[in-house]
Image (cartoon, rainbow, N blue to C red):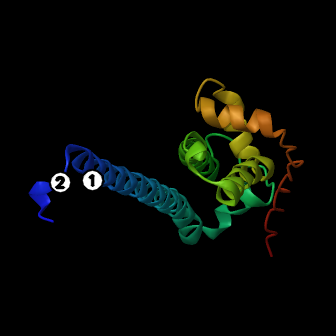
């Protein structure tokens, strides 16, 4: 039978099959696009955190202010000001992570939110910054409140004794 000799109903059936296949391909493409988008998002978030981590590679003594519950030196002190600048950068990055969490799935989302909670829990300088600027980083602030994170008790660094003269 020649294709031209098909009835109108047969042509309609063929058109429906082709349309169905087209819709199926679009659904597959959208699914792949969403998957790739999530992968790109996680890669981007990881890159942001890696940029922050670079500070700790270059200045490892700063780690204690963000992971060991160590109280930062006072404002005006060079190291204290650097700690606050790092905390500001971390707040910007973590807010970005929180704002995009709905696009992440299950364990990946939970891991990032645990990371956010741990920074808040273990860094008095980070908590101080969020308290000082309650209207900044609304997504991050909301996540912290809803997570009911219990902060650690800050360690206060003892003053070093003055060097004795011989």
Q: Earlier in the sequence, mark 2 or mark 1?
A: 2
Vertical comparison of 66 with 87: above or below:
below
Label 2 crowding class (10 Å Cα cut-off): few <14, some 14-19, many 20+? few
Extreme-top residue of the structure: 135
Image point (31%, 48%), residue name: 16
Q: Residue visible at 79% across and 55% down?
A: 70
The residue positioned farthest toward the bottom in the image shown: 166
Task: Please tell me which residue lies in front, 77 or 123.
Answer: 123
Foreground: disc 2 or disc 1: 2
Q: Is residue 139 left or right of residue 35?
A: right
Secondary element at tag 1: helix
Residue 1 placement (x, y as % from top left): 15, 65
Seen at 90% across and 48% down, the residue is: 153
- Relative image position of residue 25 (x, y in whole percent): 36, 57
Quadrant housing residue 67: bottom right
Q: Is residue 38 left or right of residue 119?
A: left
Which residue is disc 1 drawn over? 14
**Label placed on residue 88:** none
Residue 44 visible to an observer of this rendering: yes
Q: Give the quarter of the image for residue 147.
A: top right
| Mark 2 residue element | loop
* Residue carrying label 2: 6
* Residue 34 % position (x, y): 46, 53
Q: Residues within 10 Å of mark 1 (few under 14, many from 20)?
A: few
- Tell me where residue 69 sits by quadrant: bottom right
134 relative to 96, above or below? above
Distance (Cα) linking label 2 and label 1: 10 Å
Query: Are the residues at dot 2 and dot 1 in contact (C-beta closer than 8 Å)?
Result: yes
């Amino acid at each position: 039978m020649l294709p031209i000799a098909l009835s109108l109903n047969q042509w309609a059936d063929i058109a429906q099959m082709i349309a169905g296949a087209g819709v199926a391909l679009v659904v597959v493409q959208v699914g792949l696009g969403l998957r790739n988008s999530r992968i790109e998002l996680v890669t981007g978030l990881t890159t942001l955190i890696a940029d922050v981590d670079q500070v700790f590679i270059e200045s490892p003594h700063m780690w204690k202010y963000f992971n060991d519950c160590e109280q930062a030196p006072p404002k005006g002190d060079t190291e204290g000001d650097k700690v606050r600048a790092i905390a500001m950068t971390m707040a910007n990055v973590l807010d970005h992570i929180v704002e995009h969490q709905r696009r992440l799935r299950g364990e990946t989302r939970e891991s990032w939110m645990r990371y956010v909670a741990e920074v808040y829990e273990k860094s008095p300088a980070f908590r101080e910054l969020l308290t000082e600027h309650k209207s900044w980083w609304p997504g991050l602030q909301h996540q912290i409140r809803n997570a009911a994170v219990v902060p650690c008790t800050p360690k206060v660094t003892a003053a070093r004794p003055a060097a004795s003269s011989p």
